[in-house]
Each structure stands twice: as C-alpha cells, then as structure tokens.
Amino acid sequence: MVAITVNSSHIQTSQVKRSFSSASDSYDEHAVLQREIGDRLLAHLDFTKLEPKRILDVGCGTGYFTRLLRGKFKKSDITAFDLSESMVTTTRKSHNRRLPWHGRNLHASGNATSLPFKSDSFDLVTSNLAMQWVPDPEQMLKEMRRVLAPGGLILFSTFGRRTLIELRQALAEIDQNNAGHVLPFPDVMSLGDAVTKLAVETPVTDADLFTLTYPDTISLVRELKGLGASASAIRGRKSGLYGRALIKQLDENYRAKYADDDGRVRATFEALYAQAWYKEEGFEHRDGMIPIRAEGDLTIHGI
C-alpha cells in the first residue's frame, strides 16, 4: 500500500476562505463531530504539566476549541486565528465576559502557512481540524513550530485516510473521476513522518475512528456543505458539491452498500491527533515517533 503524504496542493485557498466565511452562521449546527474531536484533543493536555502564558489556536473556526482552551487556561492570553475573517468575528462574539483575572482574548486572520507572528511567541500552539484545508500542511507545521517558544507544545488534529471512505467509493463506482470530490487525507504514519521532520521531541500520534449515521445520503452531503466543505475548494472541481443527477445516482449506490437495517446510511470519519514538544533547532532527531492506534467505535446520529 502506498502511503498518502501530507500534501494538499489541490486545495484552493481563496475558495476555502469563501466557503468557510459563508458557512460561519451554519457551522455550529452541523459540527457535532468537530466538537467531539475538539473535546478529545483537549483531553491530551490532561497528561501534561504545561502552564502556558501565551496560546495560539490556528484555524479557530467559530471558536469552540478556543473556548475550551479558555476554560482550561483562564489566566493565559489566547489568540484565535483563522483564514476567514467571518469565522474570527464569530469567535470574538462568542467569548464570555472577561473577568479581571482572566487572560486576554486576542484575534487575527491570515494564512496558516505564513503566520503573522514573531518566532518563539507562544507556549502552546493548537489546531483542531483545520490542516486538511491547507494547501501545504507541512509548511503549516513548520510555521506552528517557528512560533513555538522554548519549552512549548504543539497539539493538533486533522482528518485521516479513512474519512468518508464510503462516499469516495460510492462516487468512484459512478465515475472514477468523481472520487476527487472527496479530499484525500493522510494516514497516521505519514502524519508522524511530517511531525518528526520538525525540530521537536517526544512526538506522539494517535487516532480515533467514528461512525456517523444519517437519514439519507443527501443529509450527509448537506452536512458537509454546512460545515463549509465545498468541492469548488478543490482544484479542478466545479462549483456546487454535486449535481442533481449525480446525487440521485450517489444515493442509490450509497444505500445499496452502506445503509443499516433502520434505513439510515453510515459514514466513517477518522481523527488523527499529534503532539510534540519544542526542541532547539540544529539538534539531531534522537526521538522516534510513538504511534498509538486507539480506534474508538463511537456512533453518532447526524441530522
């Protein structure tokens, strides 16, 4: 099997920005899984003794994970950062009233592959489910490492190779070219390789597998659109996620293979998590990746 590298050069950044900006009002309605993965990502911090003074949340979206960070680190200054100004605005409006002893809530927008911050600026750099929408994830990782201060931690999640595998296969059965409507995602080893290229130590990866169910295929497609997932964000794909004729064929193919006894259709999502501590530039990478495959069997009923 050929591993999928951490490379999303097929992503159109300008269209990603438009898609997520237009989804800023509907995102939270559809983001059940995103919140669950955010909760699990935050739980990784339970095993650290980190007391960060400055935190950066890259790809903050509507601010759910940013708010989780605020709940855990009340005295920290937290910067919420996103490609979409609309998402940043939504995050800014979502904050609770700041108490005098709380750290500051800061906000910025821009490209994750060129962070507008000085090197060594943050003690904790996080990102929850944003990396799959970045055209150069390895450059994003380099930037997260660049702004990390000595003693600091990088912590992030992204979708893995088995995400939406049913949708990809059902589309490919109609026309092999249709499989490109679904983003290719990295596997856990490819992600680990990308992390170990950085000046970091004690890198750890792990994974969870989720099964979500939906009343029908169109409900799945609508949820993806509500989350800002647009086929037009993928280079060479037309605007509009799928046409009516394709949707009809897709629903027939999908139901034939992936419907449960109650008639609901299922979809697989794989979440990959990674964390790594700061290491001074120039040192050899003595530490190997520690892969931990912790696949859950959580089933979530969608809309």
Image (spheres, rainbow, N blue to C red):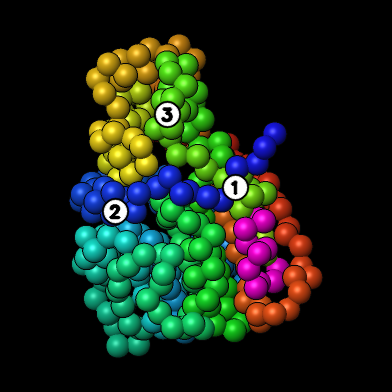
The disc, 3 or 2, on the residue closer to the chain's N-terminal end is: 2
Disc 2 residue type (three-letter): Ser
The kind of secondary structure element at disc 3 is: strand
Query: To which residue does mark 1 refer?
Result: 5
The kind of secondary structure element at disc 2 is: helix
Residue at 28% across / 49% down in the picture?
A: 15
Which class describes the residues within 10 Å of circle 3: few (<14), some (14-19), or many (20+)? many
Query: To which residue does mark 3 refer?
Result: 213
Q: Residue furthest right?
A: 286
Q: Which residues are magenta?
A: 192-202
Residue 257: in magenta span: no
The Cα–Cα distance between marks 1 and 2, rounded to whole angstroms, is 23 Å
The Cα–Cα distance between marks 3 and 1, rounded to whole angstroms, is 29 Å
The kind of secondary structure element at disc 1 is: loop
Which class describes the residues within 10 Å of circle 1: few (<14), some (14-19), or many (20+)? some
Residue at 63% across / 61% down in the picture?
A: 195
The reply to whether residue 173 is visible in this rendering is yes
The correct choice, above or below, for 197 with respect to 262 in the image is below
The disc, 1 or 2, on the residue closer to the chain's N-terminal end is: 1
Numbered tag placed on residue 14 in the rendering: 2
